[in-house]
Image (spheres, helix red, strand yellow):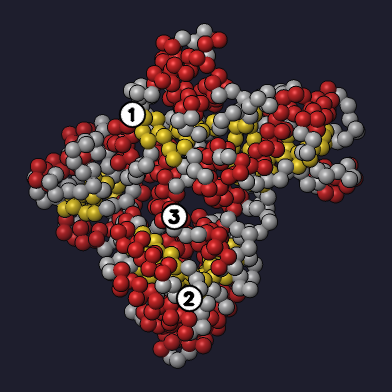
């Protein structure tokens, strides 16, 4: 059985990078030690953006220099000299060196960027045979009729098979949406070979460069720090040679406006487009001729900093600048989360991931790396999508995460805040929030309905309808009530609010499950080869034995929901019957209560950390224990020990700590750190969606 797969395009501009990204995402969930290899590379590998994307996103250990075979210029020279056998041997040697230390290698064929397309096609086809790797073929339907595309796919498939390749799957990429379904039906009706054919809709954003890519490629300088907005796409270019009134009739959404630097009218009109519903919104402005805004205009711009589109300047004339911009090729960069999400969303909407994994002979490893676990969260959340409310629509990180979540179809989203402000800010950031429901708690027609229910639930605390109505102006209370009445399945907040502001409404309204007396938290600790569960490290300072037992049972339930078999260690400074004292007695009593309340749960306590994780220590301290030496859930006796331990392991062992994840509530609400990153928000929403799923869906 091969430990590799080979992605080969049968023509230029196939969008092969999208398929490679989708396959790497699939493999990263199943393969512990993964590598990526390019048999032929054009130019300096260290400067190749696609190599950098794959290595950084999937945290590959292989240096870029070892991820490539032979330079394309040398390959063409060897073939011209009749030494193709030498070329094949050199590439195979490089491939075997790359594959020697890993479990699976995804190989990617060439991009047909040189003048020897026929050479590249034949070489790719023959090399796949020598590697013994199943082939994934990729072609494109852009600019063609459905009949032409189908004919080309069948012809390419036949050529690969004639040369001895085994086709695992075929992709027809970049197909016009109005042709895609008919093409899928044709391939279902008249299949070729025994592998599946996946038809992927054209994803327009992948054919668009970002502002940052254009600025770098043409040597433009920024007139202000654009921040993350520099990663927004350019849908088109518009040269502004007309006066502003006429130009506004000819511009387009997402356009890079190219104009001489002394055209303040065009500049200010482009800025105003971002806060107006009446005209297309500019992606950015490129000022030409080495001219920059006059001081009076610059003062005006400084006062509009939040709404400014990215502003660039270049010394050349407008015609030369426009020509240079049009020549920039789009690439997917590792820092562009939205573009990555668009590519993966296009792939995952169509592909049967389990069937494709089987076709390329990928067996899921029993060990779980942090990367595998993080990406598995997305897969689990998508199995039974839930609706999650995000109360902090004024935070750019929330909007960016929302765009990623919507692209990947991880969850349905409700974003709270002023819809006009959110829409305008999303336009400035170049984000597509189509599909998200935008609601303003202050003006929502649901406010009175939710206030009536809040007043009913809190009447015993003296809350009147008027008081409840006022409270629902707070987005955290509004979002919590949406969860309580079933308008949403879960809530994620905390990017701009304290933990108390996030959790207090849930404690007052949603409250704990009937069988649980306390809300607690866990961290999912992703170590190099496994995932452990630590609780409680964030909420309860000094739990009683009864509360500690509830924390242990809740933590075991959380572990099980996220695919970790629970073996619970009730931690103490003493193991077994060796020690005495109030702290040990608390843990001993808590352990007794866990066994009484959850007799089927594997639990040991009191137990020291070393005896819980190290088999040799466990053998001497607690021989015969089903938990000692192989614990997966660690329950700390107090917040002091739990918080310090999780941070020590996170920093010293370079573990990925996902959380805190709240548990014990009847419905899921989770708290973000105010220093959270976009990836943290995406993971937390996925976790909340999984918590909200029915038990059978989450298994």
Q: Which residue is mark 1?
A: 418
Q: Is any part of residue 334 visible from this angle?
A: yes
Residue found 47% across the figure and 32% down from its top: 488
Which residue was labeled with disc 3?
A: 349
Above-or-below relation of 590 to 432: above
Residue mark closest to the camera, 1 vs 2: 2
- Per the image, label 3 sits on a secondary structure element best described as loop
Q: Nearer the viewer, residue 371 or 45?
A: 371
Which sits earlier in the primary sequence, circle 1 or circle 2? Answer: 2
Nearer to the camera, 472 or 431: 472
Judge left or right: residue 52 versus residue 574: left
From the viewer's perspective, is 125 left or right of 426? right
Chain-order first, disc 1 or disc 3: 3
| Nearer the camera: disc 1 or disc 3 | 3
**Between 91 and 443, the one nearer to me in the picture:** 443
Counting from the top left corner in percent of width and height, residue 537 is at: 66, 32
| Residue in the image at 48% along x and 26% along y | 485
Q: Based on the displayed image, in which of its 4 quarters is residue 620 positioned?
A: top right
What number is the disc on residue 223?
none
x and y percent of residue 407 in the render? 41, 48
Alpha-carbon neighbours of circle 1 within 10 Å: few (<14), some, or many (≥20)? some
Q: Which residue is mark 2?
A: 193
């Amino acid at each position: 059985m091969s430990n590799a797969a080979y992605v080969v395009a049968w023509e230029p501009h196939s969008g092969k990078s999208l398929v490679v990204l989708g396959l790497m995402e699939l493999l990263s969930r199943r393969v512990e030690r993964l590598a990526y290899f390019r048999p032929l590379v054009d130019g300096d590998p260290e400067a190749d953006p696609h190599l950098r994307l794959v290595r950084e996103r999937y945290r590959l250990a292989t240096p870029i220099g070892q991820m490539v075979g032979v330079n394309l210029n040398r390959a063409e020279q060897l073939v011209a000299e009749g030494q193709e056998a030498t070329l094949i041997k050199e590439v195979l040697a490089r491939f075997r060196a790359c594959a020697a230390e890993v479990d699976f290698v995804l190989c990617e064929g060439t991009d047909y960027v040189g003048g020897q397309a026929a050479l590249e096609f034949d070489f790719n086809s023959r090399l796949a045979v020598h590697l013994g790797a199943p082939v994934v073929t990729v072609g494109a339907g852009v600019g063609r009729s459905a009949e032409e595309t189908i004919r080309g796919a069948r012809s390419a498939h036949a050529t690969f098979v004639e040369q001895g390749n085994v086709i695992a799957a075929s992709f027809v990429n970049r197909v016009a949406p109005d042709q895609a379904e008919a093409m899928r039906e044709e391939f279902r009706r008249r299949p070729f070979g025994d592998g599946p054919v996946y038809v992927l809709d054209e994803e327009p954003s992948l054919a668009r460069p970002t502002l940052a890519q254009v600025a770098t490629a043409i040597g433009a300088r920024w007139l202000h720090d654009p921040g993350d907005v520099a990663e927004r796409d350019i849908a088109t270019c518009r040269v502004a040679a007309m006066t502003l009134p006429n130009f506004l009739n000819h511009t387009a959404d997402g356009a890079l406006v190219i104009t001489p630097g002394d055209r303040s009218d065009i500049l200010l009109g482009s800025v105003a487009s971002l806060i107006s519903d009446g005209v297309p919104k500019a992606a950015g402005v490129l000022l030409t001729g080495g001219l920059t805004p006059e001081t009076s205009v610059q003062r005006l711009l400084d006062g509009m900093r939040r709404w400014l589109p990215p502003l660039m300047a270049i010394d050349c004339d407008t015609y030369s600048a426009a020509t240079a911009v049009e020549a920039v090729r789009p690439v997917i960069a590792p820092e562009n989360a939205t573009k990555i999400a668009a590519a993966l969303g296009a792939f995952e909407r169509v592909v049967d991931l389990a069937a494709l994994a089987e076709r390329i002979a990928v067996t899921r490893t029993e060990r779980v790396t942090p990367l595998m676990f993080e990406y598995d969260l997305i897969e689990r959340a998508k199995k039974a999508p839930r609706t999650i409310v995000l109360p902090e629509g004024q935070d750019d990180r929330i909007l960016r995460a929302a765009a990623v979540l919507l692209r990947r179809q991880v969850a349905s989203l409700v974003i709270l805040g002023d819809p006009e402000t959110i829409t305008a800010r999303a336009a400035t950031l170049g984000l597509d929030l189509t599909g998200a429901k935008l609601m303003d708690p202050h003006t929502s027609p649901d406010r009175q309905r939710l206030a009536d229910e809040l007043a009913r639930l809190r009447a015993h605390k003296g809350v009147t309808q008027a008081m409840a109505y006022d409270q629902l102006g707070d987005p955290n209370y509004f979002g919590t009530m949406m969860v309580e009445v079933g308008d949403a399945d879960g809530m994620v907040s905390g990017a701009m609010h304290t933990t108390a502001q996030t959790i207090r409404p849930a404690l007052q309204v949603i409250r704990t499950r009937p069988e649980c007396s306390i809300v607690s938290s866990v961290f999912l600790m992703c170590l190099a080869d496994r995932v452990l569960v630590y609780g409680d490290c964030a909420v309860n300072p000094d739990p009683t034995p009864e509360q500690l037992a509830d924390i242990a049972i809740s933590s075991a339930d959380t572990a099980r929901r996220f695919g970790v078999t629970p073996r619970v260690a009730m931690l103490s400074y003493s193991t077994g019957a060796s020690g005495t004292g109030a702290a040990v007695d608390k843990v001993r009593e808590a352990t007794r209560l866990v066994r009484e309340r959850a007799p089927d749960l594997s639990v040991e306590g009191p137990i020291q950390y070393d005896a819980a994780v190290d088999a040799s220590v466990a053998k001497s301290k607690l021989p015969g224990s089903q938990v000692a030496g192989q614990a997966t859930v660690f329950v700390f006796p107090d917040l002091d020990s739990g918080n310090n331990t999780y941070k020590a392991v996170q920093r010293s062992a370079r573990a990925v700590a996902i959380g805190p994840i709240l548990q014990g509530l009847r419905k899921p609400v989770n708290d973000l750190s105010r220093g959270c990153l976009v990836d943290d928000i995406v993971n937390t929403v996925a976790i909340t969606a999984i918590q909200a799923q029915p038990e059978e869906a989450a298994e």
